[in-house]
Amino acid sequence: MIAGVVSATSGLFVNVPAFIQAVNPPGGRVGSYEVHDWRQRNEADFDTFVEKQREGYHYDKNLDAWVKDSELDKLQQQRHQKQQELDALQKLHDKRVKNQKKNLINAAAGAMVGGDADKAAQVLKQEQQQLAEENARIKQLNDDINKLDSEISYQKTRQDFHQQK
């Protein structure tokens, strides 16, 4: 009985694939058209995917559509705005520094002549406070610009990588 079961099992393993191939040949009409159509659809979808990536698009699953990848543009605009803000603040800061030197001399002279040293000291303290705040803002803007530069570099590398594919 054991020999019969082993023999029947091995016979099934050998003959069933041959039987399936005889019923549905590899070049037969049923399987080959379906496989061929499936292959063409997938190749066309892949080609579309590659072209859209090269053009700077990405597929948004929520919208079920190709969307222009404008992250790089947004980052570059943000950087440009921050740079303009920094340039304007730097000009204002430079003027304040020049005026502070003049005000120091005037306050010292005024305190010696008029005796109103408290008012002169208060004005100078306010100017120093404004300068310190401007310095902090300038440092923050520089840090923001450096972060944006890093992100822009990453996005450009990512875009170049997709264009090379």
Image (cartoon, rainbow, N blue to C red):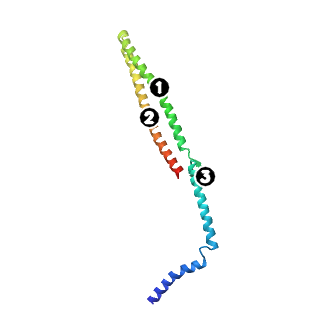
Disc 2 versus disc 1: distance between alpha carbons? 15 Å
Residue farthest to the bottom, as pictured: 1
- Amino acid identity at mark 3: Ala
Residue 33 place in picture, x, y as percent: 63, 69
Determine the image quadrant of residue 118: top left
Q: Which element carries disc 1, helix, strand or loop?
A: helix
Which quadrant of the figure contains the N terminus? Answer: bottom left
Amino acid bearing label 2? Asn
Q: Earlier in the sequence, mark 2 or mark 1?
A: 1
Q: Nearer the viewer, residue 3 or 157?
A: 157
Q: Earlier in the sequence, mark 3 or mark 1?
A: 3
Measured as percent of width and height from the top left, residue 134 is found at 43, 28
Instruction: State if disc 1 and disc 2 touch (CB < 8 Å).
Output: no
Spatial separation of the CA atoms under disc 3 and disc 1: 46 Å
Q: Quadrant of residue 35?
A: bottom right
- Whether residue 61 is visible to the viewer of this picture, yes or no, is no
For label 1, the residue is 91
Residue plotted at (52% across, 51% down): 164
Image-quadrant location for residue 31: bottom right
Secondary structure beneath label 3: strand
Q: Label 1 amino acid?
A: Lys
Q: Residue at x 47, y 25 (%)?
A: 91
Residue topped by disc 3: 65
Count all numbered tags in the image, as a single digit: 3
What is the x, y in percent for residue 45? 59, 58
Indicate whether 110 appears above or below 85. Answer: above
Q: Which residue is mark 2?
A: 142
Q: Is residue 110 above or below residue 155?
A: above
For label 2, the crowd category at 10 Å Cα-Cα, with few meaning under 14, some 14 to 19 and many 20 or more, is some
